Image (cartoon, rainbow, N blue to C red):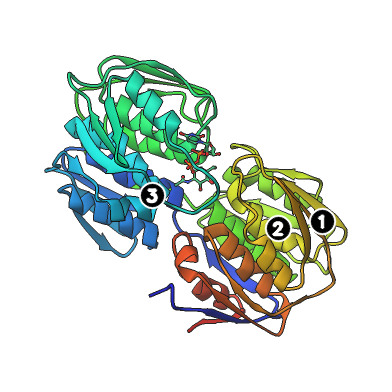
């Protein structure tokens, strides 16, 4: 059980070598829910082995699909899908469980579920999801913590204007719209690469979608979707975390199976700190090491293509030993500095005030016992401990395992002294 395990890190080893980036968690999860819409067997390659992906497979099995994994390929047979209930224990395990709603309504017309769980980053409401689905004809009764959703005569297209480009809401609308009657337009849609991946998958299954990756997406509903074979895009947040880890130890690394074009905003900030990054065709990138880095210009987390909120925590860890003062403004989530108090235990000098965090670079961190409180904050503790003098002990691994495929194994393969006990 990863909630009783710990990572033991002896810091100070310079990382050097080559790492393969696994498939994107944030793509795999909506793709697995999209498989519900395809009448037959969907094959997903490059599907990361993560606990959140396991939860998605358990939800699929619960609603009647047959799931099996072989290496990094997951096969979902959605020949039989029951309209029904997603149990509360599975809903609570991750935020993404909510994207099953759009797919279930599209396939069976009915779904009963509870409010989703996931990492505690603030309130994380689902009002945008529900209001859009209601505009498309879903009747949703919210009672006793349950959402009882029915489409009555079926879903129909609608013009939906999102007040914020929510990733999850855009995905849910896409999933509901592909087999709804008529045309749906999503205005102020999220533009993340994971949205494009979902639209690519749905299009291969026969959906008619224009504009994915732009802020207006138009979907022409079709009668039904057929299954397809698809490869999940690389995980840009895992790739970014690996880069932070190597840079933290003043090391150098080659990343393979990544997509540098999805990481432009982040890579520019690394370059502004003095790092050299070389990108090659075929999903390869090289980070060359330096002895010291200067603090970056003020970082504001923004929807894609801005600086990703998910890389803020690992990147904050990197800035703890940069020369000068770094300022972070978190604009997406209200409570995304939970790693800060733990980084301070490791010797960092950081102050937070509301959504702003100010990091004063120090010369050296020192090993300590720290605890992850959520996924990316946990990764930040691993990044920091790699350069901390002495031994660090990191608990709360159940969060880290949600989004990184054996993080310690990857880091060990490039020279880190890290083990799970
Ligand atoms: C997804 C990602 C997550 C990432 C986030 C922002 C997945 C599985 N997760 O989460 O890793 O950090 O995008 O890039 O893909 N909001 C509302 N009402 C809603 C929906 C969202 O107010 O109905 C608010 C949220 O509280 C938050 C902001 O919108 O403040 C962004 O949320 P959203 O883009 O929906 O993030 P997720 O899809 O949950």
In this view, 294 is above or below 226: below
Q: Which residue is mark 1?
A: 274
- How far, Cα to Cα, is label 3 from label 2? 26 Å
Q: Compare residues 17 and 183 and report the one nearer the observer.
A: 183
For mark 2, give the secondary structure: helix
- How far, Cα to Cα, is label 2 from label 1? 16 Å
For mark 3, give the secondary structure: helix
Residue 20 visible? The answer is yes
Q: Looking at the image, is mark 1 or mark 3 nearer the viewer?
A: 3
Image quadrant where one finds the N terminus = bottom left
Estimate how packed mark 3 is, as few (under 14), some (14 to 19) or many (20 or more) residues with alpha carbons within 10 Å: many
Q: Is residue 261 left or right of residue 218?
A: right
Q: Looking at the image, is mark 3 or mark 2 nearer the viewer?
A: 2
Precedes in sequence: disc 1 or disc 3? 3
- The response on whether ligand 1 sits within 8 Å of label 2 is no
- The response on whether ligand 1 sits within 8 Å of label 1 is no
Q: Looking at the image, is mark 2 or mark 1 nearer the viewer?
A: 2
Q: Which mark is residue 316?
A: 2
Q: Which mark is residue 28?
A: 3
For mark 1, give the secondary structure: loop
**Residue at image x 53%, y 54%?**
258
In this view, 326 is above or below 365: above
- Provide residue 334's location: percent of width, then percent of height: 61, 44
Disc 3 + disc 2, Cβ < 8 Å? no
Q: Compare residues 255 and 373 and report the one nearer the observer.
A: 373
**Residue at image x 55%, y 29%?**
164
**Residue at image x 32%, y 57%?**
55
- Provide residue 197's location: percent of width, then percent of height: 42, 39
Estimate how packed mark 1 is, as few (under 14), some (14 to 19) or many (20 or more) residues with alpha carbons within 10 Å: some
- Provide residue 316's location: percent of width, then percent of height: 71, 58
């Amino acid at each position: 059980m990863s909630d009783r395990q710990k990572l033991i890190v002896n810091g100070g080893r310079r990382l050097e070598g080559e790492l393969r980036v696994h498939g994107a968690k944030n793509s795999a999860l909506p793709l697995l829910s999209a498989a519900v819409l395809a009448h037959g067997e969907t094959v997903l390659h490059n599907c990361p082995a993560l606990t959140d992906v396991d939860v998605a497979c358990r939800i699929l099995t619960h609603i009647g699909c047959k799931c099996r994994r072989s290496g990094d390929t997951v096969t979902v047979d959605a020949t039989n899908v029951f309209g029904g209930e997603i149990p509360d224990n599975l809903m609570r395990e991750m935020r993404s469980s909510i994207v099953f709603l759009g797919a279930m309504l599209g396939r069976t017309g009915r779904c009963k579920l509870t409010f989703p769980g996931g990492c505690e980053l603030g309130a994380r409401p689902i009002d945008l999801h529900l209001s859009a689905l209601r505009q498309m004809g879903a009747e949703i009764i919210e009672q006793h913590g349950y959402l009882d959703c029915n489409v009555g005569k079926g879903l129909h297209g609608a013009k939906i204007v999102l007040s914020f480009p929510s990733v999850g809401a855009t995905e849910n609308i896409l999933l509901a719209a592909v087999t709804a009657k008529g045309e749906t337009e999503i205005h102020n849609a999220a533009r993340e690469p994971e949205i494009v991946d979902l639209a690519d998958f749905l299009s291969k299954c026969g959906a008619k979608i224009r504009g994915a990756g732009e802020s207006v997406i138009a979907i022409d509903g079709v009668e039904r979707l057929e299954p397809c074979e698809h490869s999940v895009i690389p995980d840009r947040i895992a790739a970014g975390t690996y880069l932070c880890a190597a840079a933290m130890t003043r090391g150098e690394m080659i990343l393979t199976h990544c997509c540098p074009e999805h990481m432009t905003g982040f890579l520019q900030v690394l370059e502004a700190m003095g790092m050299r990054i070389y990108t090659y065709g075929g999903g390869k990138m090289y980070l060359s090491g330096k002895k010291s880095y200067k603090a970056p210009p003020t970082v504001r987390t923004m929807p894609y293509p801005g600086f990703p909120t998910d890389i803020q925590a690992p990147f904050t860890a990197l800035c703890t030993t940069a020369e000068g003062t770094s300022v972070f403004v978190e604009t997406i989530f209200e409570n995304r500095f939970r790693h800060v108090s733990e980084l301070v235990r490791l010797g960092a000098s950081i102050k937070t005030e509301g959504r702003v965090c100010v990091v004063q670079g120090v010369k050296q961190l020192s090993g300590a016992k720290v605890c992850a409180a959520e996924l990316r904050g946990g990764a930040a503790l691993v990044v920091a401990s790699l350069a901390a003098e002495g031994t660090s002990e990191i608990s709360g691994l159940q969060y880290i395992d949600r989004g990184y495929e054996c993080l310690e194994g990857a880091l060990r393969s490039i020279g880190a002294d890290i083990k799970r006990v």
